[in-house]
Amino acid sequence: MIIIRKNVKQIAGRPVTTQRSLLLDIIRRANRHLDADELYRMAKSKAPRISLATVYRNLKLFKELGLIAESNLGDTHSHYEIKSAAEHHHLVCLGCGQIIEFDSPSIAKATAKIQRENGFYITSIQLKMEGYCPKCKQKKE
Amino acid sequence: MIIIRKNVKQIAGRPVTTQRSLLLDIIRRANRHLDADELYRMAKSKAPRISLATVYRNLKLFKELGLIAESNLGDTHSHYEIKSAAEHHHLVCLGCGQIIEFDSPSIAKATAKIQRENGFYITSIQLKMEGYCPKCKQKKE
DNA sequence: ATGACTGCAAACTGTTTGCAGTTAA
DNA sequence: TTAACTGCAAACAGTTTGCAGTCAT
């Protein structure tokens, strides 16, 4: 697979180190939620000397820069994914662990209303619904 | 303050130990989110020999029994509160840290719709919105 | 009597930090 | 050149676990 990294001279004004662009690249390509350790192992296969501390430091940076979103999908540790334009939410199946992402105009409307009513300036919305997907629901019955 | 604990012979079929009922009592009376350490310290003032492990073990039990709800309000550790009939959500102010709870019929409608559309059987909904409350918003301007 | 509980201390996991050396701009 | 980065190892916070003893039923 060819890695295209032309014209990337900076990451939001920060120096582009090989580790940094590698990490962001992996997250971009993953197209799913990664946790710090997954990301670390994936990065390590390309850059064996990279450290877990660097992974955490860059995740923190990416988050501050608004490039990625953090979510607590399991309850033990965080997951990260590229922030796309569309705000979306998560359905977590307690049976098989699959995570379904979805976007919902009705949620967007509802949250906008809450924002107005409370005078809050909202910067992020995290909606997680837990339950059982159709397959696992059936298994339980 | 008089602690009423008559007629409580069991907690969902589990033996009622002094620690257990004390802990549940504190959570019930708190009427707000407690973290494990707060709960531990509050319990310790009544039962000095109680251990943090017991707090965690019982929080886990209460959660399994559906008596309390866990949420990740800060990002470092969990908070717990009594599960009331009404599902409610959280607005977290990133400025002053205050947490506003709210209930929203429009959210309830939206999530019910998602449930139908996805064939999911939903057991819990956690909505967290982060941002700035009116006061902190003003300070930032 | 006995299974479920408790306190204690030690282990474990996920994350952060201090430091000395390295690198992008 | 120099501020920002990196790897490493050690520290840290929150939580869990093994064990021997205690308690509710």
Image (tube, coloured by chain):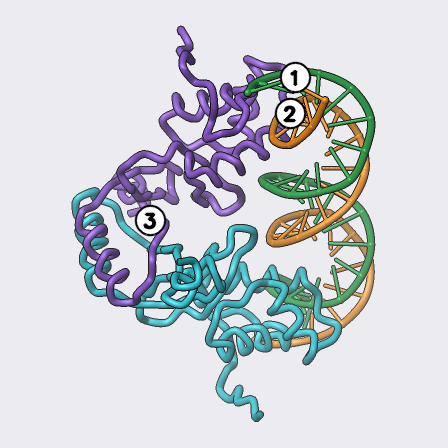
Chain colours: A cyan, B purple, C orange, D green
Q: Position of residue A102 (x, y in %)?
A: 32, 67
Give me the C-alpha separation between circle 1 and circle 2: 6 Å
Which percent across, then down, holds residue A44?
Answer: 69, 74
Label 3 or label 1, whichever lies nearer to me, is 1
Alpha carbons under labels 3 and 1: distance apart: 40 Å
**Crowd tier of the residue under label 1, counting other residues whose Cα lies within 10 Å: few below 14, some 14–19, many 20 or above:** few
Q: Left or right of A138: which side holds A19? A: right
Q: Is residue B50 above or below residue A28?
A: above
Q: Which of the pair A29/A61 is nearer the observer?
A: A29
For label 1, the residue is B49
Label 2 marks which chain's residue? B
Disc 3 and disc 2 in contact, CB within 8 angstroms: no
Q: Could you say which quadrant of the image residue A87 lies in?
A: bottom left
Q: What percent of the width, then of the height, locates residue A14? A: 53, 69
Look at label 3 and name its amino acid. Gly
The residue lying at 47 percent from left, 68 percent from top is: A81
SS of the residue at dot 1?
A: loop
Do the residues marked 3 and 1 share a common chain?
yes
Which residue carries the number 3 mark?
B131
- Residue ID for mark 2: B51
Respond whether the residues carrying marks 1 and 2 are from the same subunit.
yes
